[in-house]
Image: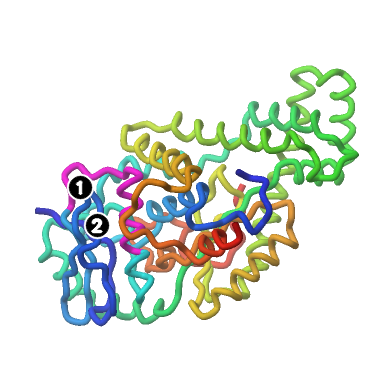
Amino acid sequence: MTVVPAQQTGGGGGSSGLYDVLELVLDRGLVIDAFVRVSLVGIEILKIDVRVVVASVDTYLRFAEACNRLDLEAGPRKDPGLPDLVGEMTESGARGKSKGALSGAAETISDAFKQARDEGSERETESRPRARKSTSARRKEEQE
Amino acid sequence: MSTYVYGIAASSHPALPEGMGGVGDPPRPVRILREGDLAAVVSEAPEGLRPKRRDLLAHQNVLSEAGAAGCVLPMRFGSVAPDDNSITGVLAERAEHYKERLRALDGRVEYNVKANHVEEAVLHQVMAESPDIRGLAEANRQAGGGSYDDKIRLGELVAAAVKAKEGDDAAALQRLLEPAADDVSVGPESTGWLANVSFLVDRGSAETFLAAVEQARMDMPHLEVRVNGPLPPYSFVEPGPAEPAGTAAGGTDTGAG
């Protein structure tokens, strides 16, 4: 999902696009103190979880392996092994999020993100209520 | 019966999505509550509403439908009022404030930009720029990968160099896009991206902004840049009491790592 020509990234309906928008829906927007918010505890936990930036032994080992595999003679975009590498990184990132969830609510959100990505990769076949595609998504379709 | 709130618009908004399917299963129909010059986009709040994918999407879809035809102040997901009257009460009480926000955001949309390193490309840069890292990597390679401690030492150096590049690249990306936007809001840091920045863009200037994004992609080919928009201005409504520090509008370096 990561190494693609520029014009193919960033559509509003793409897999990462859906994930990115859900982050905004959960984290931004108007909050009115007179109203309650559902499952607030779970959302707060997710936010803390998402913000943890850890340089771990796992990260170090992964970088060391990546450098080991890197062919310095080749250009930066010529290694056919790269998509696998980046894919692994993304996978482990997603697992880390659900692993760290401390409540059912947080897991629900993590699942929502995961499902969103899964569904997005299937081109969002599920019916959505009057879904509106962004201009970038339309442009993307025109190019395909 | 409690009421779910999606957003606030002017009552003169030309096409509020009345009757559209909202949150819940089955989707609760969207209703419009009017109070003076303002309108609230609401529906019945389903029992046991949780932040599930379907409901998050329903919230976003209602707002993007409403936002397509005119300005709407989007609520954060999950706002529930005890009843309709308490919503019209809030609209009446804070009418001037919401009307001011609607005027300020009229004709403007949010574009959220997130960026990641293309890992191989950034590793190439890091190794090209550091003889120490290059030497250590070569020694490890010749030793068949190196010992556990050797790998940790190399990985630690590389991680620090990559992290420094993340901060630099996030700042550089923001500098490239800022001139094409009216306002900037830096989002929370995460391991999922090195930059997470929202830009408030005039509808009429959207093509200019997207052209700036394309230019940034060409200038910084070691970044994967994702753009989402046009969106309702989630990041540019006034910070509420639950707004975490650091997410309000501001043009500072994200320092995202």
Q: Is A28 contained in the magenta span?
A: no
The boundaries of the magenta stretch are B45-63
* Residue A48 visible, this angle: no
Q: Position of residue B117 (x, y in %)?
A: 68, 47
* Residue beneath disc 2: B21
Q: Position of residue B145 (x, y in %)?
A: 81, 21
Instruction: Please report contact status of discs 2 and 1: CB closer than 8 Å, yes or no.
Output: yes
Q: Secondary structure at mark 1?
A: loop
Residue for point 87% across, 38% down = A72
Looking at the picture, does residue A42 appear above or below residue A99? below
Residue A95 lies left or right of residue B87; in this view the side is: right
Type of the residue with mark 1: Pro
Counting from the top left corner in percent of width and height, residue B247 is at 47, 59
Nearest the eye: A137 or A54: A137
Q: Vertically, is A53 above or below B84?
A: above
Q: Which residue is mark 1?
A: B26
